[in-house]
Image: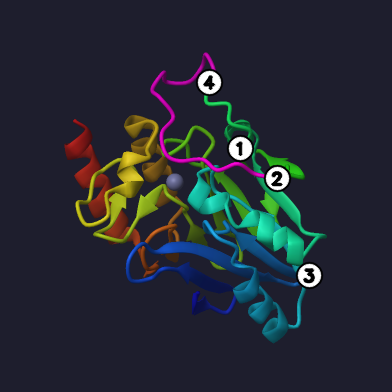
Amino acid sequence: MKSTRLGPHLIQLTQWPALFPINCYLVVDEDGLTLVDSSIMSPAAAVATVVKEAGKELRRVTLTHAHGDHVGGVSGVKKLFPNVEVSISERDARLLGGDKTLLPSEPQTAVKGSFVKIDWKPDRLLKPGDRVGSLEVVASPGHTPGHDAFLDVRDRALIAGDAFQTRGGIAVSGDLRLLFPFVAIATWNKPAALSSAVSLRALQPSLLAVGHGEAIGSPGPAMDRAIESARKAFG
Ligand SMILES: [Zn+2]
């Protein structure tokens, strides 16, 4: 995996950077490290390298959403680091178990994207406003019903999962980019994704880090562009 340091507290790990980039992130906290997402195959070896360099333990794994290319690596990480706490939103935990039914309160569009069989259960179910180390949980439904983003309260770096993509051009989840159409194809509900994108923009992040593509510093103008494009595309 390719490893990119994005700041004093944040390291990006990328699987298949040239062809089909899938990112996960290590956040460095006082008490240890948090892994955000886990790629499709185990990132445990790359995580172990950072753990050694940082001289801190891996404490937590938290997941932006339940798609296979974000949760598939958890099993391997748990084998190497059996004491980690794994967390995901209460809503997307249902998807982890293969239950794609919608709640009566939700827009009735089909859940999309690919899911993998897992041999673990989350230890903690997240609600908006919860904290995972220095990360604040920000609900950002649309890509999936229970999608979360994570805002580092120390420096306002935002790990946005698939609420945005930057590979193939920055876009709100659901707004198709032909050079990397997979995020759009896997999106549950476009209006919800757009309204989440607006909420994430309003957080005034210092950095935008996403599931697919490179991170963007001072991302306000780029996020505005993406939101404008999605408004037009979604009608
Ligand atoms: Zn996804």
Where does the image place residue 203, in percent across and percent down from the top left? Answer: 46, 52
Where does the image place residue 93, in percent across and percent down from the top left? Answer: 63, 36
Front: mark 4 or 3: 4
Ligand 1 closer than 8 Å to label 3 CB: no
- Residue type (three-letter) at the residue carrying disc 3: Asp
Which callout, 3 or 2, points at the residue further toward the start of the chain? 3
Which region of the structure is painted magenta?
A: 102-120
Front: mark 1 or 2: 2
Q: How far apart are marks 4 and 3 (CA)?
A: 38 Å
Which callout, 1 or 2, points at the residue further toward the start of the chain? 1
Front: mark 3 or 2: 2
Q: How far apart are marks 1 and 2 (CA)?
A: 10 Å
Which callout, 3 or 1, points at the residue further toward the start of the chain? 3
- Residue type (three-letter) at the residue carrying disc 4: Thr
Q: Are marks 1 and 4 in contact (CB under 8 Å)?
A: no
Q: Mark 3 points at which residue?
A: 31
